[in-house]
Image (spheres, rainbow, N blue to C red):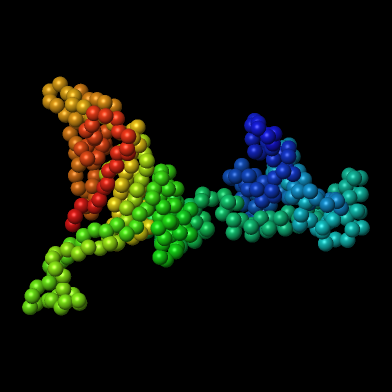
């Protein structure tokens, strides 16, 4: 491998072939399997000829310094990788066979007679294969499948509530983005810290969740007080007015500071806004209301000036246009705020436009809340 402070020009496979003693045995087998995707997985088939690697046990009575002694790539007369292991051998210093028997096999091999050694390697190969197969069942990193496939991924999907195929693929973000946070998603109740970790990890920006954000809740006509009819008992159900204050009405997600492109991505209709909506909604459920507060870096706050030949319209110096572009904002399904991608760069009063004659020293902040029902 490369010395300290230098990069190696050799691939990992080349290093395995020349410096096998520096590799973990399970890691080396996994690398070889990924190099030969057409071969059967080690230990899964009945015919070792269909596997990518053959295991042999080193014949020595010395204490081994590593798991592997050598790894030989395929060549003339050898269609598979051949890995010489220092463990699980029938003969050798740690094998079950008596030491005189091991010494006899070593003497035969030195004389050119490898029949006994090759016979024992039939069983040595099977022993190492079974060990690797058992370890692979409980170590996802050794699997040849993608991280979001296979039995282990199915277990994680079941823990987070996506155990069947009909529940998956309904968000704008891939479902595998949730697997890394299966521990937090499996907890009941789910913590606010887990939500911050999930959003920070996927969106890659600083996000702070602020709980207990109060708000007014509008009462239904059946819940308001009517004298002589209903909800008229003081201290029990009587309410003065048509709305009540709820101190835990919402959770504020403070995002930033952001640059201008990242700021626009979190506005309604942006790709980051859709990912934020889906992840936060999946984590907290439909009963939690979120308020989003975007913080724009002071240096990234765009200036605004009146330009245009036929009519005057607001436009940022970085987004000068020959003709005004209509700002299309509409309410989509389920009351979600959407915007046309073609107008994403257009300045929007209250969102991406600031009227000032001086450079801002503070952050440009915008708070987005759900429209009233």
Q: Nearer the viewer, residue 299 or 59?
A: 299
- Quadrant housing residue 231: bottom left
223 w.r.t. 136: above or below: below
Residue projecting furthest to the left:
228
184 or 292: which is nearer to us? Answer: 292
The answer to whether 328 appears left or right of 58 in the picture is left
Direction from residue 48 to residue 102 in the image, left or right: right
Q: Position of residue 272 (x, y in %)?
A: 34, 44
Residue 209 in sight here: yes
Position above or below: 224 against 30: below
User: In the image, is 275 to the left or to the right of 87?
Assistant: left
Tell me residue 289's x, y (percent). 29, 57
Determine the residue positioned at 73% across, 37% down: 18
Image coordinates for residue 250, horizontal then vertical, percent: 29, 57
- Horizontally, residue 341 falls left or right of residue 64, namely left
Q: Residue at x 40, y 58 (%)?
A: 192
Q: Nearer the viewer, residue 203 or 88?
A: 203
Taking the view exactly as shown, the residue that stands out farthest to the top is 309
Residue at figure coordinates x 76%, y 54% from the top left: 87
Percent coordinates x, y for residue 80 in the rendering:
69, 44
Give the number of callouts. 0
Evaluate whether residue 115 shows in this view.
no
- Decide which of 76, 254 is in the foreground and name it: 254
State the quadrant of the C terminus: bottom left
Specify the quadrant of the image occupied by residue 294: top left
On screen, residue 231 above or below 304: below
* Residue 303 position by quadrant: top left
Residue pictured at 29% horizontal, 30% vertical: 359
């Amino acid at each position: 491998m490369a010395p300290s402070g230098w990069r190696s020009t050799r691939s990992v496979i080349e290093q395995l072939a020349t410096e096998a003693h520096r590799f973990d045995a399970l890691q080396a087998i996994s690398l070889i399997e990924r190099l030969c995707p057409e071969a059967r997985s080690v230990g899964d088939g009945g015919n070792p000829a269909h596997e990518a690697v053959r295991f042999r046990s080193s014949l020595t009575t010395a204490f081994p310094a590593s798991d592997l002694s050598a790894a030989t790539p395929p060549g003339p007369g050898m269609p598979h990788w051949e890995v010489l292991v220092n463990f699980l051998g029938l003969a050798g210093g740690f094998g079950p066979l008596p030491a005189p028997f091991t010494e006899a096999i070593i003497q035969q091999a030195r004389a050119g007679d490898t029949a006994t050694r090759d016979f024992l390697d039939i069983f040595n190969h099977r022993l190492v294969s079974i060990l690797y197969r058992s370890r692979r069942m409980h170590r996802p990193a050794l699997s040849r499948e993608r991280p979001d496939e296979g039995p282990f991924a199915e277990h994680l999907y079941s823990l987070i509530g996506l155990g069947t195929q009909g529940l998956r693929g309904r968000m704008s973000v891939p479902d595998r983005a949730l697997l890394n946070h299966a521990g937090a998603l499996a907890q009941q109740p789910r913590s606010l810290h887990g939500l911050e970790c999930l959003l920070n990890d996927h969106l890659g920006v600083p996000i702070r969740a602020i709980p207990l954000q109060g708000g007014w809740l509008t009462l239904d006509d059946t819940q308001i007080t009517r004298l002589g009819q209903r909800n008229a008992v003081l201290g029990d159900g009587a309410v003065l007015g048509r709305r009540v204050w709820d101190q835990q009405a919402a959770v504020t997600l403070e995002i930033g500071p952001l640059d201008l492109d990242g700021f626009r991505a979190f506005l309604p209709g942006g790709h980051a806004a859709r990912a934020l909506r889906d992840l936060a909604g999946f984590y907290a459920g439909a009963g939690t209301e979120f308020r989003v507060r975007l913080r724009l870096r002071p240096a990234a706050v765009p200036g605004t000036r009146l330009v245009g030949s036929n009519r005057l319209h607001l436009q940022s110096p970085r987004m000068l246009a020959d003709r005004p572009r209509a700002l299309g904002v509409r309410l989509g399904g389920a009351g979600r705020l959407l915007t046309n991608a073609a107008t994403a760069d257009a300045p929007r009063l209250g969102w991406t436009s600031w009227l000032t004659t001086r450079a801002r020293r503070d952050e440009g902040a915008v708070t987005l809340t759900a429209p009233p029902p």
